[in-house]
Amino acid sequence: MATDDKGTSVKSAERALGLIEFVSEHESVSFGEILTELSIPRSSAHGLLQTLTATGWVAHDPRTRQYSLGLRAWQIGQNFRGHTDLLGIVRPLMDKLAAAVGETVQLAQLDGVNNVYIAISQAARTMRLASSVGTQLPAHATGIGKTLLGLLPPAEAERRLRAAAPLAHLTEHTVSDVDELLVLLDRVRREGFAVDDEEYISGCRCVAVPLPFLSDAHRQMALSVTMPTSRTTEQWPADILAQLRATVSELEATIRP
């Protein structure tokens, strides 16, 4: 009986966390959307939502019958200090690079098969990339994501990609075949960079490099420059890559004097 109780508790915790994550990805969601997307039994979903609403993790609007992320999630988020010291070092260098190339510079970390942006330096030019800290994108379709996947041991990268298949095919250039991606990741490891050539959004390109000195078995980090295809030159990505690598070298020298 103890085993069953423990198993039930763990399952309930997983469902609660999954529900919070799902709600956080949307401005608001309905009860029906939660049931459909998360495949939670109706009675269990009711109980979880009552608990999460009562504790402030989820907010419920009785007028629209929509659920959204609660104040408690924001309060807990303010206590996270995992990147504070790092960002204090990286951000000035990102701002410097963004000003030099006139394009968006992003720092991201791998989460499963997604890249999560943890810092962004926007250039002052028009047609800037519309992205924000905390945004998650499918790693297989972005330059920074493929760079992050390349930091994983090959067997682990393959395991994650096959478990997530079928992978989204977002544009005509997206590589969504796992075997083809694994070949690309081998190339990323050899060359030390990856690109997104209109694979996530048409008309947008990205070049990214890994930050191995900030990465380990539990965390993979990378830096990228993203820009409209119309502003790339015939030398792309080599022209941007040279400046990106110079920034990474300066960062490593700062962290490891």
Image (cartoon, rainbow, N blue to C red):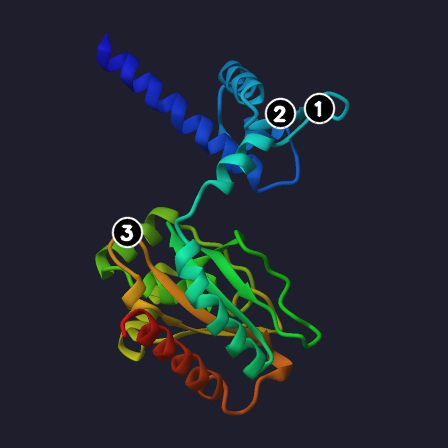
Q: Position of residue 76 (x, y in %)?
A: 49, 36
Quick check: 21 left or right of 27?
left
Q: For the point 41% across and 54% down, which residue is it? A: 83
Q: Position of residue 197 (x, y in %)?
A: 51, 74
Give amino acid for label 3: His
Front in this rendered view, residue 234 or 222: 222
Residue under label 1: 65
Q: CA distance from mark 1 to mark 3?
A: 39 Å
Q: For the point 62% across and 83% down, which residue is it? A: 231
Residue under label 3: 218
- Residue 222 shows in this picture: yes
Q: Quadrant of residue 54?
A: top right
Q: Residues within 10 Å of mark 2 (few under 14, many from 20)?
A: some
* Eye-nearest disc, 3 or 2: 3
How many callouts does the rendering have? 3
Residue under label 2: 31
Q: Position of residue 20 (x, y in %)?
A: 51, 32
Q: For the point 56% across and 16% down, which residue is it? A: 50
Q: Earlier in the sequence, mark 3 or mark 2?
A: 2
Front in this rendered view, residue 213 or 3: 213
Is 67 situated above or below 143? Answer: above
Q: Quadrant of the C terminus?
A: bottom left
- Residue 174 shows in this picture: no
Give amino acid for label 2: Phe
Q: CA distance from mark 3 to mark 2?
A: 35 Å
Q: Are marks 1 and 2 in contact (CB under 8 Å)?
A: yes
